[in-house]
Image (tube, grey):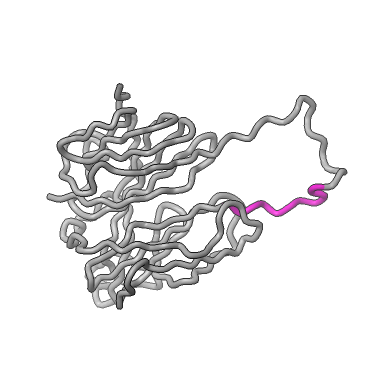
């Protein structure tokens, strides 16, 4: 039985750029592979990631990297160093673009935790004694797995996104499916790779004043959804509409999915899709 719609649109997130409709659809998709970098929990606040484009090397391919969401991708190269980072959960993102070949990749990502530095006397017998009655079990971190979509090219419809346990296909739109190890809030972030101009080391939208600057590719957040997801298999029937008055325009997008429960966030998963006019 399909659950009623539970949708929260992030009003602070920028809507799709009017220029997005003029962006050419990709003729080829690149695949970025992370070859090195931290996984799980690390003790050092300084980390480094290595990455490549799988398959034949293409002249003119550029990488863009970012840490955390909202995503503000900047041109980068492998290996890419970060730090010092604050203790806690972090997610590294990287994508590849090749403007001449009209090709780019979905976002590749890796989530890791920087451990807090040990305090004075940590691990010694003189530390504080736990309260009587034992310790409270730590909450589980949500785990997102098996992220997939029914179709990767589709047309929009007026239906709002909703989540349920069934996975019937829609005549328009697509169905995102994933599995959770516990009930959590699913956060869906939709981004686009758009053309821009390099200003002060950042890739920004082109304006009349910066149009003579070097061309670059930037990742723009088109919108987000927040959905109450069930433990087990979930299916999000999505036809491009983010809210009653917000929708994704035709173009190529990357979906990045995370889940949050009890203040803990899962490793990010991503896939790409194209909306046709």
Residue drawn at x 35%, y 71% is 62
**56 versus 277 height, above or below:** below
Q: Measured along the vertical axis of the image, is residue 44 above or below residue 244?
A: below
Q: Is residue 139 left or right of residue 25?
A: right
Q: Where is residue 141 in the image (x, y as percent from the top left)?
A: 54, 39
Q: Which residue lies furthest to the top in this view?
A: 1
Name, please, the residue furthest toward the left: 277
Q: Is residue 248 magenta?
A: no
Residue at figure coordinates x 29%, y 24% from the top left:
2
Q: Residue at x 38, y 32 (%)?
A: 233
**Residue at position x 62%, y 56% from top?**
42
Measuring from the top left, give residue 208's x and y in whole percent: 22, 70
Q: Is residue 67 left or right of residue 149?
A: right
Image quadrant assignment for residue 33: bottom left
Question: How far across and down, in percent of the image, does residue 244 sit?
Answer: 23, 35
Locate the N terminus and report the quarter of the image it occupies.
top left
Q: What is the residue that sits farthest to the front in this orientation? A: 55
Q: What stretch is highlighted in magenta?
A: 113-123
Q: Is residue 31 above or below residue 91?
A: below
Q: 233 left or right of 99?
A: right
Report the magenta stretch's main SS.
loop
The residue closer to the viewer here, 4 or 34, is 34
Q: Position of residue 199 (x, y in %)?
A: 35, 72
Residue 121 is a magenta residue: yes
Query: Can you say whether 60 is above or below 150 in the image?
Result: below
| Towards the viewer: 79 or 128 | 79
Front residue of 181 and 205: 181
Marker count (numbered): 0
> Would you identify the image quadrant in which residue 230 lies?
top left
């Amino acid at each position: 039985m399909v659950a009623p719609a539970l949708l929260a649109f992030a009003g602070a997130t920028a809507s799709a750029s009017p220029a997005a409709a003029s962006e050419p659809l990709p003729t080829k998709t690149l695949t970025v592979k992370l070859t090195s970098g931290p996984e799980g929990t690390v003790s050092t606040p300084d980390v480094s990631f290595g990455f490549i484009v799988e398959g034949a090397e293409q002249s003119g391919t550029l990488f863009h990297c970012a840490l955390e969401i909202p995503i503000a991708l900047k041109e980068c190269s492998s290996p890419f160093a970060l730090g010092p980072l604050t203790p806690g959960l972090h997610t590294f993102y990287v994508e590849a673009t090749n403007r001449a070949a009209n090709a780019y990749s979905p976002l590749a990502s890796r989530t890791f935790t920087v451990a807090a530095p040990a305090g004075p006397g940590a691990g010694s017998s003189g530390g504080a004694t736990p309260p009587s009655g034992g310790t409270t079990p730590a909450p589980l971190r949500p785990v997102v797995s098996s992220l997939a979509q029914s179709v990767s090219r589709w047309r929009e419809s007026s239906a709002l996104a909703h989540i349920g346990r069934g996975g019937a296909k829609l005549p328009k739109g697509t169905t995102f499916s994933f599995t959770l190890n516990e009930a959590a809030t699913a956060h869906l972030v939709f981004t686009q790779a758009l053309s821009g101009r390099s200003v002060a080391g950042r890739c920004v939208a082109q304006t009349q004043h910066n149009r003579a600057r070097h061309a670059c590719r930037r990742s723009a957040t088109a919108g987000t959804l927040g959905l109450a997801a069930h433990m087990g298999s979930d299916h999000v029937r999505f036809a491009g509409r983010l809210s009653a008055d917000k929708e994704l325009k035709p173009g190529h997008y990357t979906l990045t999915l995370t889940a949050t429960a009890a203040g803990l966030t899962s490793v990010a998963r991503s896939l790409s899709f194209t909306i046709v006019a």
